[in-house]
Amino acid sequence: MLVDGKRLLITGVLTPGSIAYAVAREALDNGAEVVLTGFGRTRSLTERTARRLPREVDVLELDVNKPEDVRAVNDELAGRWGQVDGVLHAIAFAPADALGGNFLNTPYESASTAFQVSAFSLKELTAGLLPVLENHHASVVTLDFDARVAWPVYDWMGVCKAALESVTRYLARDLGAKQVRVNAISAGPIRTMAAKGIPGFSLLADAWSKRAPLGWDVGDPTVVARVALWLFSDWSRGVCGELIHVDGGFHAMGTDLLSKEEQARLAAEDG
């Protein structure tokens, strides 16, 4: 099995439709030990969703913006496992006024919140867990949405995803000597709870499924999860600082995501 015996920390599990949940499920099915994280009022949602996994798993309190939480998770995993073989960073958030075509009017406070949670948190989590990650070929994987272009409605989250890609490369540079690999997966749109907060998501998803050469199922995060498992496995030991597209091939096509007519329709729907 691909990750047999691996010890993985997985953030971002909220509902069974999430990419993080699919990673946890596939990891358990492939022999890994898994611990999840949640925080605050949403932790109960994570715990409820965790009961649907093939095996019982623990949920640790982790608000990635609180250094004391990161230290506590590191200490818990050090005592439990001694070392951690992989971490999934599936953490992102942007206030409503940082999305939906409001780019020019977004206040700095909203943009900075989006950056802290969606990009800087990768550095905070990885650096904070370094004592249990270093010197045994551990793998850190983050979830991205291709930031090479300006997407309709994605706005400051797109900027933060560009920052996340850059953070991935700098972490790869600084941690490679410590035998820690850091990579990003640029996934096509998946109908998750987070996606519900993106105005116009359905139009993006419909256009994606039509134009990706392999097609794209917004309800199937398994294809993304299995690439994450490969990045956690020893089979990818030479891969570091990489952005891997799992999007049905959409990124390789020389067409705009939305036609002018579709963009006009989106603008009208968003008022």
Image (cartoon, grey):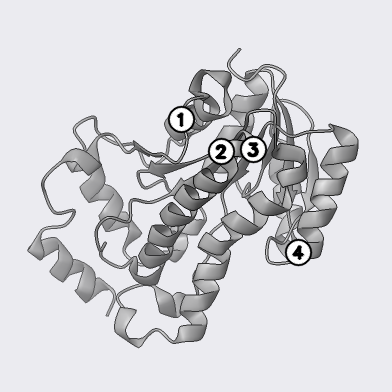
Query: Of label 3 and label 4, which has the lower sequence position?
Result: 4
Query: Of label 2 and label 4, which has the lower sequence position?
Result: 4
Rendered position, 267 above or below 255: below
In front: label 1 or label 2:
2
Residue 232: image location, x then y, percent: 57, 28
Q: Which residue is pictured at 39% across the width and 71% down the height?
A: 156
Give the CA distance from mark 1 to mark 3: 14 Å
Q: Which residue is pictured at 58% across the width and 55% down the height?
A: 122
Q: Quadrant of residue 263?
A: bottom left
Q: Residues within 10 Å of mark 1 (few under 14, many from 20)?
A: some
In front: label 3 or label 4:
3
Give the CA distance from mark 2 to mark 3: 5 Å
Residue 169: image location, x then y, percent: 45, 48
Q: Is residue 17 visible?
A: no
Q: Which residue is mark 4?
A: 67
| Helix, strand or loop status at disc 4 | helix
Which residue is outermost to the front? 177
Q: Which residue is mark 3?
A: 178
Q: Which residue is pictured at 49% across the width and 55% down the height?
A: 167
Q: Observer-nearest residue: 66 or 96?
A: 66
Q: Is residue 95 left or right of residue 265?
A: right
Give the CA distance from mark 1 to mark 4: 29 Å
Q: Which mark is residue 176?
A: 2
Rendered position, 110 above or below 75: below
In front: label 2 or label 4:
2
Cβ–Cβ under 8 Å for marks 2 and 3: yes
Q: Is residue 80 visible?
A: yes
Q: Which mark is residue 239?
A: 1
Query: Of label 1 and label 2, which has the lower sequence position?
Result: 2
| Helix, strand or loop status at disc 1 | loop
